[in-house]
Image (cartoon, grey):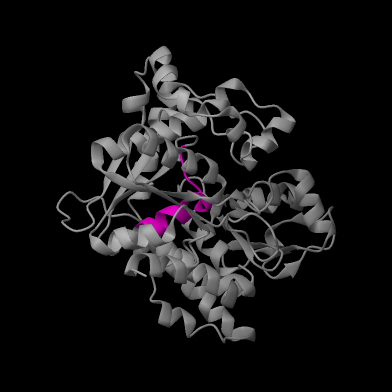
Amino acid sequence: MNKALETLRDRGFIKQCTDIEALDALMGEKPITFYIGVDATGSSLHIGHMVPFYAMHHMQEAGHNPIALIGGGTTMIGDPSGKTELRKMLTIEQIRENSESIKNQLGSVVDFSPEREEGKALMLNNYDWLGGLNYIEFLRDIGKHFSVNRMLTFESYKQRLERGLSFIEFNYQLLQSYDFLTLYKDHECRLQMGGDDQWGNIVAGVDLTRRVAAGEVYGLTFPLITRSDGKKMGKSEKGAVFLDPEVFSPYDFYQYWRNIADADVIKFLKLFTFLPLAEIDAMGDLQGSDINRAKEILAYEQTKIIHGQDEADKAHAAAKAAFNSGAAGGGDKDAIPSLEITADELAAGIPVMVLFSKTDLCASMSEARRLVQQGGANVNNTKVESIDSVIDSSWLKDDELMLRAGKKRYFRIIVQ
């Protein structure tokens, strides 16, 4: 097997391929052009979106030429794959703004520098060719190649059909397939990669390109990543683990990876870092408290990739300060999420549920109430025993209150 496919296989990226032997032979002859698409449904990607782009990085390092396709056009329709209901319709302006933001985020994993010679990457937007399509001509020239009966055999359509599948969503597969055809014609793109929920759309694109342009192209999908507890990858107490630091801070991002289950560490090191496999495999036998070192490496490497080394250094130092020093102080805690209150506010007393609900630890008063009742609320390493507790100056240490929810989530209240 050629180097690139071997790397993807050994790191756990490959789930299905339309013809792995033929693709292997093609990639062994010369570098190929391949693409991965992402729709611009929000201003920030979350870490679950990034699995294909980590694979793109490895393909690029092996000398193959990536195309990152922003779905400015397909976002206007909405992909039914993996969805339980119709996607919210966005305006063209919202989609454009989201597209710009996503472009910047993908650059943390894929090298788009124009001076690169091997593995030269492009970033394109499918609105450029979908936005001006003539619908009648599109149906006549492209739609005739699609069988409704076959489309309904794909799992994503079968699931949505039970709940209600809109006609606008039914067009999505045609548009994504047309993307592959266009990229094959204009850029000699030979491979589309994506999550396994995209299998039906990818296979349809392979078939369309062969029918219309007699092109030998291929599709490859990645497994949908879940945690060992069965929960969806990229979900935290605060919601989705977004890449935008304004939405999900680098400290919280670091903490997400630092606190994953022991059973997930090696798998995620292979998928979400660029460390050599030999180095990762050497950590495979770690047990007990020793596995925490591997978690720190995962958290640091992942934060460095997405947010840069400076933010990774800050988050690592802040985590050490929070966990090792706690309320006793010491260490650099600047990266821990915080807010400021006045000494007068604290002296007057703040009900504990009000205080916790002001932070990222609790989204509401009711959530704060549950946290206290379940024994998970701590202030400066002192457990809060009652929902009627009032936090005042007597709780203060070193001009701050270090709030903790459960064992691992911290928030600083800085008193001025």
Looking at the rendering, in which quadrant would you find the N terminus?
bottom left
User: Vertical placement of 131 versus 116: above or below?
Assistant: above
- Seen at 65% across and 27% down, the residue is 165
Task: Answer with the quarter of the image where residue 64 lies.
Answer: bottom left
- Seen at 48% across and 85% down, the residue is 282
Nearer to me, 82 or 100: 82
Q: Residue 297: give x, y in percent of width and height.
A: 47, 74
In the image, is 395 to the left or to the right of 176?
Answer: right
- How would you classify the magenta stretch by its main secondary structure? helix
In the image, is 353 to the left or to the right of 227?
Answer: right
User: Vertical placement of 316 versus 174: above or below?
Assistant: below
* Residue 332 appears in the picture as rendered: no
Q: Residue 6: give x, y in percent of width and height.
A: 39, 70
- Is residue 23 part of the magenta span, yes or no? no
User: Vertical placement of 136 versus 178: above or below?
Assistant: above
Nearer to me, 148 or 309: 148
Farthest-out residue, top? 136
Task: Answer with the quarter of the image where residue 287 lies.
Answer: bottom right
Which residues, given as a range, are shown in magenta? 43-56
- Seen at 62% across and 84% down, the residue is 289
* Residue 7 appears in the picture as rendered: yes
